[in-house]
Image (cartoon, rainbow, N blue to C red):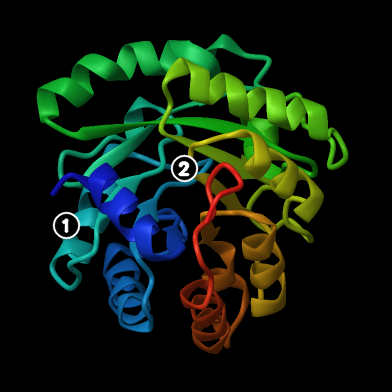
Amino acid sequence: MNVLNYIFEKLKNGKMHMTLLDPAKQTPEKSAEIAEYIEKLGTDAIMIGGSTNITQEIMDETIVNIKKVTKIPIIIFPNGIQSISKYADAIYFMSMLNSSDRTFLIESQMKAAPLIKRLGLEPIPMGYVVVEPGMTVGRVGKAILLKRNEITKAIGYALAAEFFGMKLIYFEAGSGSPEPVSEEMINAVKKEVNIPIIVGGGITDHIKAKRILDAGASIIVTGTLVERFSDYGERLKDIIREVRGSKIEIGGKK
């Protein structure tokens, strides 16, 4: 399966929802149980990763268990070379564009690239920008956090990603953020770029999801929703319903 083609084909007809599972937060068996359930709810892909306490063994066991019960793509959301697993379908080959540390800009990617090629993993080039409050990923990634009203900088980062040849641009408020990235930022970026915009962090209900989708996000990601809310199934149903009702817009065009 070519996962990038899968994403682009999906986006021809609407928008997408992806679920981020942190393999350090539950057993591999529990991750598989959650993945099986959320696939039935309609999520389009499962992202596997976290900011801390990730090992290759945990990644391998989690992905193997999930693959036993699901058919949708599994994409690694890496925090370093230790999170690479040969069992995934693809990996976001991403650079945190507003990190102050070369490790997250290019050094980890340089070290990981030969391994990714050797394993035959599909790399999906992606620009990654952390917006305040940033939460754990902002701290771990030593991000120079983009302020919620720094629209011009957001456009600049997104265009730079596109001009570098990256296929996706991801704006992240951080897992557990009280609010998602602002609609004003998403809408402004959407008008300027021709690559899909992913938005994650702080999307905890269908009202926030609708605002983000209407602003121009092509893909929304929910993660800690599964960990924080006992009624996450109902919340995800409502969020995915909003996704299915939205039409795709890239570069300001229907």
Front label number (1 vs 2): 1
In terms of depth relative to the viewer, which is nearer, 81 or 165? 165
Which mark, residue 53? 2
Q: Position of residue 40 (x, y in %)?
A: 31, 82
Task: Give the distance between the C-alpha atoms of the residues marked 1 and 2, in whole angstroms.
Answer: 19 Å
Q: Is residue 242 left or right of residue 151?
A: left
Q: Earlier in the sequence, mark 1 or mark 2?
A: 2
Return the x and y of residue 22 as percentages of the image width and height: 45, 55
Identified at 59% across, 54% down, the residue is 217
Q: From the viewer's perspective, is 109 left or right of 223?
A: left
Q: Residue at x 26, y 57 (%)?
A: 62
Residue drawn at 13 percent across, 68 percent down: 68
- Residue 142 in view, yes or no: no
208 shown above or below 85: below
Residue type pointed to by label 1: Val
Q: Position of residue 142 (x, y in %)?
A: 68, 24
Q: Nearer the viewer, residue 77 or 83?
A: 77
Residue 34 horizontal/vertical position (percent): 36, 75
Image vertical order of residue 7 relative to residue 29, above or below? above
Q: Amino acid at mark 2?
A: Asn
Residue furthest out toward the front: 253
| Residue at the spot of label 1 | 64
Q: Residues within 10 Å of mark 2 (few under 14, many from 20)?
A: some
